[in-house]
Amino acid sequence: MSQPSQRTLVLLKPDTVRRGLVGEVIGRIEAKAGWRIVEMDLRTIERPVLEQHYAEHEGRPFYEPLVEFMASGPSVAMIVEGERVIEGIRALAGPTDPIAAAPGSIRGDHATIVRENLIHASDSEESAEREIKLFFPEVS
Ligand code: IDP
Ligand code: MG
């Protein structure tokens, strides 16, 4: 029996758009059998949305530069649906620190700076539900 399909919120951060890596990252997601991009757009994320999105990190030294970076240009926001897609896209991305991320992962292949690590993907079903509501209120 297969598990019920999941949905996750993915952001291709401003560094991915600036560096022309959108196709490279989306290609890895599309290559996974059965996963589907069901919503997608290019948008400059407003600060209040970023503050809600990263509320768990408020007060940490990296918080303010992170919010500034995330507001610095357009990102690609999407909802991806499919079998175990929450865990799966986190695995494709690799760990937060791109130097520790294994070659073969998105962060491991393309990033060096912790802040500019190309991609956000929801880390649990609860986060996915909250983040989808925040970024795509009309579809949730
Ligand atoms: P995640 O994106 O892998 O879930 P989180 O710990 O939730 O990682 O952190 C959110 C984002 O904040 C990271 O993706 C990265 O852009 C940035 N970040 C996290 N830790 C640091 C740090 O120590 N220095 C600089 N930026 C950081
Ligand atoms: Mg996180």
Image (spheres, helix red, strand yellow):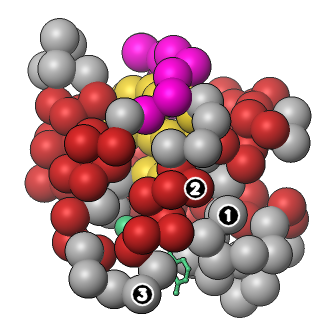
Mark positioned earlier in the residue sequence (1 or 2)? 2
Compared with 111, 84 (above or below) is above
Q: Which residue is mark 2?
A: 69
Residue that appears at 50% across and 56% down: 68
Contact between labelled residues 3 and 2, with CB atoms less than 8 Å apart: no
The circle on residue 61 is 3
> Is residue 15 among the parts visible in the rendering?
yes
The amino acid type of the residue labelled 2 equals Phe
What type of secondary structure mainly makes up the magenta span? strand
Residue that appears at 39% across and 73% down: 63
In the structure shown, which secondary structural element does the residue marked by tag 2 occupy?
A: helix
Crowding near the residue tagged with mark 3, few <14, some 14–19, many ≥20 C-alpha atoms within 10 Å: few
Q: CA distance from mark 2 to mark 3?
A: 14 Å
In the structure shown, which secondary structural element does the residue marked by tag 3 occupy?
A: loop
For the N terminus, the image quarter is top left
Q: Which residues are magenta?
A: 35-45
Q: Is mark 3 within 8 Å of ligand 1?
A: yes
Percent from the top left, x then y, of residue 75? 58, 34
Contact between labelled residues 3 and 1, with CB atoms less than 8 Å apart: no
Q: CA distance from mark 1 to mark 2?
A: 8 Å
Q: Which residue is mark 1?
A: 116
50 or 140: nearer the viewer:
50
Q: Which quarter holds ligand 2?
A: bottom left
Percent from the top left, x then y, of residue 113? 74, 75
